[in-house]
Image (cartoon, rainbow, N blue to C red):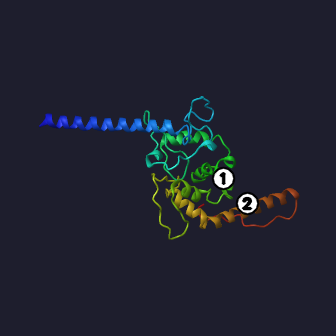
Amino acid sequence: MALLLNHVWLYVHLTRRSVAIWVGTWFRWYACLVMPLCKYACCKHGPSHRYRRCGFAHRLSELRIPARAKPYVWRDLSHVCGGPAGIDWFVGQAYSPSQWERLLLYLDSEVIASMPSWAKRLAWYMDLGDLDDYVCDADFGWAAEVQEYLDIGVTYERDRVPPSFPFDLAEDRRMSGMSLHDRMCQRMTTGKCAYRRFRARVSWRDAELFAISSKSPLCRYDPSCSMTVSI
């Protein structure tokens, strides 16, 4: 009986190993064929890497999304030896630790104002930079991109039905762990009022500083006023 169980375990182990090898080989072939035509992942060596045959993106603006990408292409396995990189263009997918590691190299090397919409969306979602960096960006083109690349229609209504995405959803750094869809709905509804209050308060603060420097009567505003809506 023990010998039989040992043979069964060995068979299952070898079968799983064969499947893993086959899947890994398929992913590598897919990456070799698709990556030169569509750079959907950033180079792990950083923006300064200039190897001539490197098929990865070295600037955030070089990144693209493969047409009709299969669900497995969204899964990053670069932390596994020889595993393929997942799609870095952020539309709400969860990142692997190695994916975050390489993306931070590029987010830290570029100014938020010059980033493409998907990267600015990621920086906003992860609370990088200042609120004023994202005031005039609406939904960062997210609804249009999701419709174009994933054929999914999203709305920001209160009675919305969460769509089904072909990837695991990311969770932000806040205590609530909100998805991009939840944060975007908040931004496009109650967040609009908060942004207007933020902009108004900044304008009044600037006016007061100007008044102080010019020795004119001070502008009056309530410094204790704060935003109660999360944006």
Other residues around mark 2 within 10 Å, as few (<14) / some (14–19) / many (≥20): few
Between 53 and 99, the one lying in front of the other is: 53
Quarter assignment of residue 209: bottom right
Number of marks drawn: 2
Q: x, y percentage for residue 76? A: 47, 42
Is residue 39 placed above or below 174 in the rendered structure?
above
Is residue 167 placed above or below 162 in the rendered structure?
above
Q: Going 36% across and 36% down the picture, which residue do you hit? A: 22
Is residue 192 placed above or below 28 in the rendered structure?
below
At mark 1, the secondary structure is loop
Quarter assignment of residue 136: bottom right
- Report the residue marked by disc 1: 130
Between 148 and 197, the one lying in front of the other is: 148
Amino acid type at circle 2 is: Val
In which quadrant will I find the C terminus? bottom right
Q: x, y percentage for residue 153? A: 52, 62
Q: Going 36% across and 35% down the picture, which residue do you hit? A: 21
Left or right: where does residue 6 sit relative to residue 107? left
Q: Going 60% across and 62% down the picture, which residue do you hit? A: 187
- Report the residue marked by disc 2: 202
Other residues around mark 1 within 10 Å, as few (<14) / some (14–19) / many (≥20): few
Viewer can see residue 228: no
Sequence order check, earlier mark of 1 and 2: 1
Viewer can see residue 13: yes
Amino acid type at circle 1 is: Asp
User: Which residue appears farthest toward the left when viewing the image?
Assistant: 1
In which quadrant will I find the N terminus? top left
Quarter assignment of residue 208: bottom right
Q: State the CA–CA distance, disc 1 to disc 2.
A: 12 Å
At mark 2, the secondary structure is helix
